[in-house]
Amino acid sequence: MEIDKAIRESDDRRLKTKYNNAIYVIKRALALYSIEEVAFSFNGGKDSTVLLHLLRAGYFLHKMEQKCSNGGLTSFPIRTIYFESSAAFPEINSFTYDTASSYGLQLDIISSDFKSGLEKLLKANPIRAIFLGVRIGDPTAVGQEQFSPSSPGWPPFMRVNPILDWSYRDVWAFILTCKVQYCSLYDQGYTSIGSIHDTVPNALLSISDSCCKEKFKPAYLLSDGRLERAGRAKKFSSSINNVGNGSGSVDSHKSSLLVASVIAVGEEILFGTVEDQLGPSLRRKIHSIGWSVSQTVVVQNDKDSVAEEVERRKSTNDMVFIYGGVGPLHSDVTLAGVAKAFGVRLAPDEEFEEYLRHLISDHCTGDQNEMALLPEGITELLHHEKLAVPLIKCQNVIIFTATNATELDKEWDCLIELTRSCGFLPTMVPYVSKHLQTNLSDVETAQPLSKLCLEFPDLNIGKILRFLDLFLGSFLYIYCLSSYCFIVQNEGCYRKSRKGPLIISFEGKVKEIFAVF
Ligand SMILES: Cc1cc2nc3c(=O)[nH]c(=O)nc-3n(C[C@H](O)[C@H](O)[C@H](O)COP(=O)(O)O)c2cc1C
Ligand SMILES: Nc1ncnc2c1ncn2[C@@H]1O[C@H](COP(=O)(O)OP(=O)(O)OP(=O)(O)O)[C@@H](O)[C@H]1O
Ligand SMILES: [Mg+2]
């Protein structure tokens, strides 16, 4: 069979591994289900085109193993279903029909939506498993395995995803190595194809030519496969601009307050055996861009502890910053904890692996593959030329890989620079502070301070957040709620010693309040 031969003759070891794994899944599925019980969901897209050829090869190899093949593949008896839509590109339709006739596919054309179409199909046929060209990174792949039962509310069948772990690059390596036909749209800059209403060529493949019509390079030249959906209109607002807890995006907060919390992972910090250099510096940095830090916690190197803390913080904060516990050691559980907090699994990220390969180079032991596992479907890599490894952002959680203050400075500066172009960490109105020094006692100070709050009728004392005995003395934060917008006033009083003067510091964002001092 020509596909099998092309792969065996290729010297692309990665492609061989991917191919062998996919063929293994197909053969197991064909051993589990009879040929009448399986179907192939084909739509002319690149992923389902790859799957078509894998299925033909897998079916042939399965037959060979059963010793009932005459040595060639004359027919392909797997029922093929195509959900046709009036919004499909004509090129997709014609490629689907032409391919079906070239390979003798029994094409069932379904005109209703996926769910009711499948309900009807399954009522009329004994289908128990459907092959799909879903890949990790597709929005619909989240939570799926190579064998995944259909979701609740859908008719019961097994979704079989033989190319789930294939990357964009793997798909094109297969198509080009095996020299199989693909839909012509992929030569016109389309990299992932939905409907005519939501798909345009990928701007990253644009060849600027001021005088003529815009031209595009072919899809296989897209260097960063993670951007394959850049030509697809987003159904949800971009996660890049969406920090926070679902209660609102940065935009809705812009005029008000953004709150972050900091999580440090590491027993050495928790037990005080190592001084935490990063925490105080990070909190100062967050504060310096006008954000408020609501909480800072230290957790042990334990996946569940990290997950619990991240889960709690991500829903009550606009952004969560986490550091420590990132690397190849058994105690490096931060990414696993973040994945668990979001209810997703860790999946290999080819691009991150590439960075690690450059970084580790000769010292490669295979561990870099473990390190390249990132939370599936929610991870964005934030690249900056000054960083050897990109920053990792999982929705509103940013993971720093820094191990000391200098590295953190660098990562932070890059993050702020990137923010200017992407806006995911907006710089807020900075805090303004005033300090008063008094020799009055605590008791004498308490009353005028309370009066001061009363004198501003539009301010309510929300809650006293913290009353801590720090090394400097007592520190009091008061959150005030204005009737117009939510502002923060940090009113701190501290002593350098029990005997010395009391320093009262007022901090906030509304300048008028400071006019009284
Ligand atoms: C054969 C087949 C089976 C599907 N099974 C499920 C399913 O079990 N659960 C589900 O939520 N969606 C299922 N879907 C829908 C897909 O997850 C997804 O919504 C669909 O491919 C549309 O993708 P798009 O929005 O990118 O066009 C299925 C689709 C097809 C074609
Ligand atoms: N209209 C459809 N009819 C039949 N199967 C479909 C349809 N839409 C999606 N599928 C199934 O879902 C899989 C994933 O769809 P997806 O759009 O991600 O991939 P693709 O269309 O093969 O490639 P591309 O990402 O380039 O569009 C397809 O490979 C196919 O198995
Ligand atoms: Mg598609």
Image: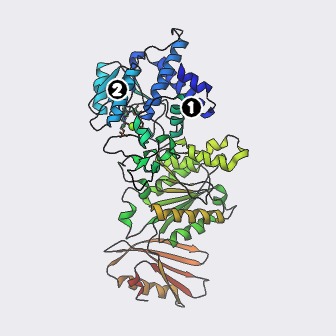
Q: Which residue is mark 2?
A: 97
Say what secondary structure mark 2 lies in. Answer: helix
Q: Residue at x 48, y 18 (%)?
A: 59
Looking at the image, which is closer to me, 212 or 216? 212
Location of the C terminus (image quadrant):
bottom left
> x, y percentage for residue 323?
59, 58
Q: Residue at x 62, y 49 (%)?
A: 355
* Extreme-bottom residue of the structure: 439
Q: Which residue is mark 1?
A: 18
Say left or right for 498 vs 226.
right
Whichever of callouts 2 and 1 sits on the residue coming sooner in the sequence is 1
Q: Is residue 20 above or below residue 135?
A: above
Say left or right for 371 vs 163.
right
Q: Is residue 276 visible?
A: no
Q: Residue at x 36, y 50 (%)?
A: 236
Say left or right for 348 vs 149.
right
Question: Is ligand 2 within 8 Å of the beta carbon of the residue shown at mark 1?
Answer: no
Could you tell me if the residues under marks 2 and 1 are in contact, i.e. CB atoms within 8 Å? Answer: no
> x, y percentage for residue 73?
48, 15
